[in-house]
Amino acid sequence: MLYLTVLPPDELLAAVRARVNRYVNSGDAEDILDQAGVRDARALLAVIDETGYPRGEGALPWIHAYHAAGLLHHARDVARPDTVDREQAESLLAQVHDWVPDLAEQLRKLAQVPQEPARLRPRRVAVHAFAGSALDEIDGVVTATRHAIRECRDWSESLTLRMNLAEAQHLRFGRTGDVADLSEAITTAQAVIRETAPYDARYTNRLSTLAGFLQARFVSTMDISDLDAAVESYRKALDAAAADHEDRPMYLSNLGRARLLRYAYVSQDPAELDTALAEMRTAVDTTTPDDPGLGTRLSGLHQAYRARYEATRDAGDLAEALRTAHAAVEATAPEHMDYLERILDVGATHLERYERGGDEGDATAATEIARSILHAVPPEHPLHRLATDVLDRAGGRTPRA
């Protein structure tokens, strides 16, 4: 399968259709020639074929998928004649020709698109607002941002728009799981940073954003060079930030978390773990109580203490892990996406202490928390399995009256 996260066929179909429709409406060849569209079409056909949908008259999922993918390749050939696209289009459309009565008219409209001037629709978009949106909506954000870049006459503003584009490409990765989308985000962000002066107020944030992209690609590919590059980019962001920079605690915490990741998956170097823990502890200590990032930084510090406890079996580290786990929950709003996970961290740490010292109070706390999570999430949720494991290891004890 092309995508690590397989999208529903309806969402992939909508994304492929929307790209063709945008081309008809705007004449934007860049949009239709974007390789992301080919990846989406390929994934759509793979899902349809692997799911075993029937073929032939009345087999709507198969007809819709092959029709949409065929139109995409035909539109690409119209925008920039290419033998591969032409052959793909002919092969796909020939299979559904008999069940698409207005196909000839659709092809005629596509053939006329290059004869008309491009009709760009530039928009400034708050990219973060589209996190979790359907793929066709994210593609619309990518297209609108590209149009804004092409229309922009201010160099500094164009850098901001290009960074927005990188973030939108990163959102695509969040929907598709396709590393190619993430790599495009990285390439775009790297180009922007090369053109951003170190004294620019946006320089540190762009470095930190790039580091996050690199770290995400490491998690997907386990390419150590990406993790090393992420650590270096986080370090540069921290070094470039003034001592009173409002985002300095965030940069410091991000750097520590990247080091912790490198310790866990690459180095196993106690010195790196100690450095990561010290950075995250300083980040927490310098974060104001009303900072919305406090819960995330406390959660990272909890993970560092847990990692050091697992390496040294030092009871002091375990006590700090439990303290910071509780503090992370207290600093996290109930509606936060990680709220339940942080509650389970508390339970898992109580379980760790029970297995070390045998205190029934820790077993009871772990059991109560695991049961609350099991009641809060459906069986297919990842936390359900983790909570079940905590409950099993705690012996399934019934909380005392």
Image (cartoon, grey):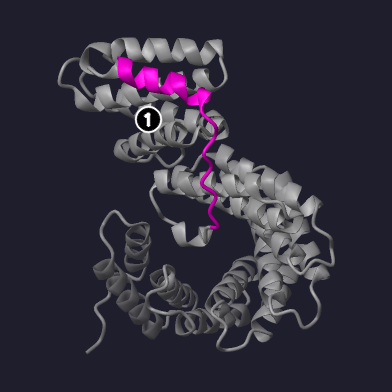
Left or right of 120, for residue 192: right
Bin the neighbour count of mark 1 within 10 Å (Cα to Cα): few under 14, some 14-19, many 20 and up: many
Q: Please indicate, yes or no, whether residue 218 appears anywhere in the rendered image.
A: no
Q: Residue at x 53, y 78 (%)?
A: 295
Q: Which residues are magenta?
A: 104-124
Dividing the picture into quarters, in which one does residue 64 lie?
top left
Q: Amino acid at mark 1?
A: Leu
Q: Residue at x 38, y 61 (%)?
A: 386
Q: Residue at x 34, y 41 (%)?
A: 11
**Image height check: is 96 above or below 257?**
above
Let me know if residue 115 is in the magenta part. Answer: yes
| Quarter the N terminus occupies | top left
Residue 73 spot, x, y in % from top left: 46, 21
Left or right of 188, for residue 397: left
Residue 296 spot, x, y in % from top left: 55, 73
Question: Residue farthest to the front?
Answer: 116
Question: Residue farthest to the left?
Answer: 58
Mark 1 highlights which residue?
44
The one nearer the camera, 248 or 266, is 248
**Image height check: is 151 above or below 354?**
above
Left or right of 157, for residue 56: left
Q: Residue at x 27, y 15 (%)?
A: 96
Q: Please indicate, yes or no, whether residue 32 appears anywhere in the rendered image.
A: yes
Residue 81 spot, x, y in % from top left: 56, 15
The one nearer the camera, 37 or 338, is 37
Q: Which SS class for mark 1?
A: helix
**Image height check: is 43 above or below 220?**
above
